[in-house]
Amino acid sequence: MAIPKETLSLNDGWKYTASNDLEAADVENWHNAQPLPTSIHLDLLANGSIPDPFSAKNEQLVQWAGKKTWIYEKQFTVPSQLLRNLTRMVVLVFEGLDTYTTVTLNGTIILETNNMFLSHRVDITEQVRSAQTAQNETHTLRIVFHNADQKAMEEMEKHPEQSWFSFHFGNKRLAVRKAQYHFGWDWGPVLTDCGPWKQINLEIYQTRLTDISIRTHLDTDHREAVVDVSVEMEGLADYARISIERDGLTVESRVISLTDKKTTTAIRIRNPKLWWPWSLGEPNLYTAKVTLFNGCDSSVEELDSLRKRFGIRKIELVQQPLRDQEGSSFFFRVNGVPIFAAGSCWVPLDSFLARATPGKYRRWVQLAKDTNQVMIRIWGGGIYEHDAFFDACDDLGVLVWHDFMFACGVYPAYSSFEESVIAEVRQNVTRLRHHPSIAVWCGNNEDYAIAYLAQIHVGKADYDPAEMDPDKIKQSGFPARLFYEVRLPEVCKELIPDISYWPGSPFGGSFCNAPTEGDLSYWTVKRENQPITAGLARIVSGDSLELEAWACNMTLRHVSINYEIQAWHVETGQNVWTHTVSAKIQLDPNRSTELGRTLLDSRLGGEAHYKWNELAFAIRLFSAPESSVSNPAAERNRIARYVNFHEPLKEVPFASEEGKITVKLTEGEIGSIIQLSVSVPMKGVYLDFEDEDTVEWDDNGLDLVPGEMFKVCVTGVKYGGAKKLRVYWLGETSWQSQTLVV
């Protein structure tokens, strides 16, 4: 008789403690953990053991948590009726453990891990059945999460022959297959987290589907597509029923005989609905459902089933010699149509990964689409993203450039490290390969640039870029080329032959950031955030400060402006300096214009001395009148603004008292208008309607200065009854806030 697979969740009922060894845990204080997925910082935060690390200067107060060994433990039972059939296996499935762990079941070690990006399956059939025979039906599962910092240092000491070089938060992170941003980055804090960051389940089965892979082939005229469906299984099954569905209707269906552990069949679809990025068309999706069963009657009870969505499309990375000039192209073509892949770089949704939910992923990808982004690049210092992220991209027609998880370093390639990386790559590429949104896999983030800089600054990472012998690459000063130029393209060619692979970003030509070949990291794009932008930068030298001002016009028309720069004392709000340029300045289209530099001393032309960290500066651009006739209204038509605070922000003496901000809400043509004014300079003013998930702001996270009324439009507010609008801003020692009922 067919016995279907059973899956039992082990996500609830965990407890945790700190310890330096297994035995000491018996006398430590245990605390209840949150349901999985979770992590130690989230559990400590939930239990009041640490302050919010994102508030004030609390980052330093929580560093102790990343320097300890932590233990998670849970007891569970297996229902006896699920064990009656002696042919059934019992398997523990760990979807993700961060990072160095020792896992025991009833005191016996069953697993040791050292790679956050790997899932693990452990057959515990013998242990469970032995315990059942001994009438001990309660099992104790314990996971020891070892100190990643300590383990990383141990790895480095074992391999002094490696180049070990990084520009971000030390070299130790390079030895750990763990989200690199955990060790700190320019955009996030140092929070060396650990814990069961994905789910843990118990599977009981005779037979299971291990994977279904889907590969599509599209005719040049788009009138027919061939869908290759490969079925991989574990155990015994006679047949598989394969159904291709779209919009809930079956397009094609067939039953195939399973003669091996992997069986492939080709299904033709006439007049297919293609998957397009949103800028070209509709992101049409199909669903492949595979069901295993025994006997010739497919209506009998199924053994196991899997569903995967996919899209029929062809994505190409086009690199062709340019006509009449040096270099080659680098662009994407979807279903034969070239596309402008405008987009941005994606870092993890939250420093604490367990707080990312499918709903949050959907909202952020929708936001990318709403801001005309066609492609999102998953940055190599984060994680191989959750399926929920790709589901959102598939649904909304947003393309994905996916880095492999290497960032800003000269990584090692010794044998055990190589084995771990290849296992991680194979597993995650297999998991994600059916998503039609993935356009390209990329070897790393900026590692070629770091190797180049290592040669210049510290004499490390010497290598011959023409050398392709794997053994010689491993012995060179840039051994990770073994991954980027040999191993990763091999895996991608095997598992995803229709998707492009690119060695790194940036990469191309004789130099990693060559302007005429490959892809280019063009950091000056930070000036070009809106059609017209303004900017200020500080250059401090002793008691003097030089202000550099610029404007950027990304429109296709000439724009005439004048401008004003002002300074305020951050704590008191006093306006201490004003510099007005009333002469008409022309901003040429599609370029930056340097407005000049202004040298200031600490008196700012007055009697009082000021420290530069006490001052906030702002520049405002105004439309210049077209005629010589004075028109005050036209002269004060502000078209761009920028506020500049001293950095690092922790040195700024922000005002800490409440009541420094005034908020007024009025109805607009589309949504509501919130008008903000402040009496002191404020950093990071953030608006949030409590208990409202559908709210969208046209701007948020604002830097405000006295003397102006700033307007923000909000839509999606469901009125009816009092609504609480919470306003946050950065204070001297913590985030300040006030709540208004509107």
Image (spheres, rainbow, N blue to C red):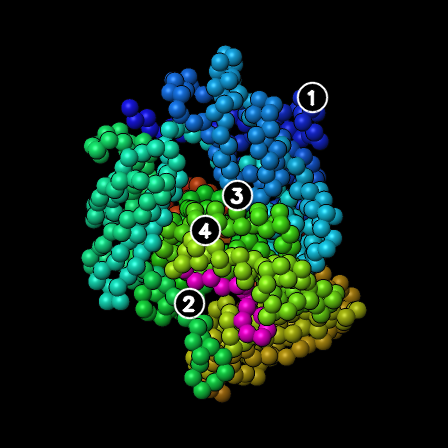
Taking depth in this image into account, of 346 and 423 the one nearest to the observer is: 423
Q: Amino acid at mark 4?
A: Val
Residue at 55% across / 67% down in the picture? 506
Task: Check contact, mark 3 vs mark 1: CB within 8 A.
Answer: no
> Marks 1/4: CA distance?
43 Å
Task: Check contact, mark 2 vs mark 3: CB within 8 A.
Answer: no
- Position of 360 relative to 536 (above/below): above
Q: Which residue is mark 2?
A: 317
Residue 374 seen from this side: yes
SS state under label 1: helix
Q: Earlier in the sequence, mark 1 or mark 2?
A: 1
Q: Amino acid at mark 2?
A: Leu
Taking depth in this image into account, of 598 and 296 the one nearest to the observer is: 296
Q: Which residue is mark 3?
A: 118
> Marks 1/2: CA distance?
59 Å
Residue at 75% across / 63% down in the picture? 611
Residue 286 seen from this side: no
- Position of 511 relative to 361 (above/below): below
Q: Amino acid at mark 3?
A: Leu
Q: Residues within 10 Å of mark 3 (few under 14, many from 20)?
A: many
Give the main secondary structure of the magenta stretch. loop
